[in-house]
């Protein structure tokens, strides 16, 4: 399943939450959903990557369990507000350790 969440029948069938034309965007959102505790899977990414000439006609779907749809929509709203964005500062300006560390 390559990082997709396992299926739990107690949470309902998988439902399409959003679609993207970029597999990368779908995988980013899946990671944000999983980080927020919402199971998520990406569907059709391999189809888009295999048939690149059809990529504009085949959306990549992000699916979540039916009973978690409302929670997932809240995560999408937070994602769109930029709450999952990384800081703009240069990570090399604040190294996690000093050169004098053992």
Image (tube, grey):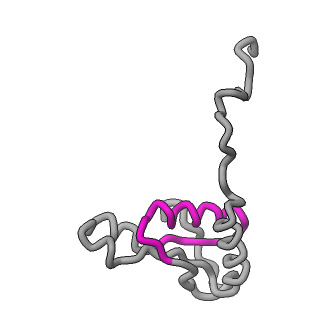
Residue visible at 46% across and 72% down in the picture: 20
User: Could you say which is closer to the camera, residue 67 or residue 91?
Assistant: 91
Figure check: 39 above or below 101? below
Residue visible at 27% across and 66% down in the picture: 52
Q: Quadrant of the C terminus?
A: top right
Q: How many marks?
A: 0
Task: Indicate whether residue 94 is drawn in magenta.
Answer: no
Can I make out residue 33 in this image? no
Figure check: 50 above or below 89? below
User: Could you say which is closer to the camera, residue 26 or residue 13?
Assistant: 26
Can I make out residue 93 in this image? yes
User: Could you say which is closer to the camera, residue 42 or residue 12?
Assistant: 42
User: Could you say which is closer to the camera, residue 6 or residue 86?
Assistant: 86
Magenta stretch: give its range.
19-42
Q: Percent x, y for residue 93? A: 69, 27
Drawn side of residue 70 relative to residue 47, left or right: right
Task: Indicate whether residue 27 is drawn in magenta.
Answer: yes
Of all residues, the one furthest to the top in this rendering is 100
| Quadrant of residue 76 within the rendered picture | bottom right
Q: Percent x, y for residue 89? A: 68, 38
Figure check: 2 above or below 67? above
Residue visible at 72% across and 67% down in the picture: 37
Residue visible at 66% across and 65% down in the picture: 79
| Quadrant of residue 95 within the rendered picture | top right
Figure check: 99 above or below 35? above
Q: Percent x, y for residue 32? A: 64, 62
């Amino acid at each position: 399943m390559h990082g997709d969440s396992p299926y739990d029948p107690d949470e309902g069938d998988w439902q399409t939450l959003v679609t993207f034309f970029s597999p990368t965007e779908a995988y980013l959102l899946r990671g944000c959903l999983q980080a927020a505790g919402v199971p998520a899977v990406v569907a059709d990414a391999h189809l888009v990557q295999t048939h690149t000439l059809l990529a504009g006609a085949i959306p990549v779907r992000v699916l979540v369990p039916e009973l978690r749809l409302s929670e997932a929509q809240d995560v999408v709203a937070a994602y769109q507000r930029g709450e999952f964005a990384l800081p703009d500062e240069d990570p090399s300006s604040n190294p996690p350790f000093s050169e004098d560390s053992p």
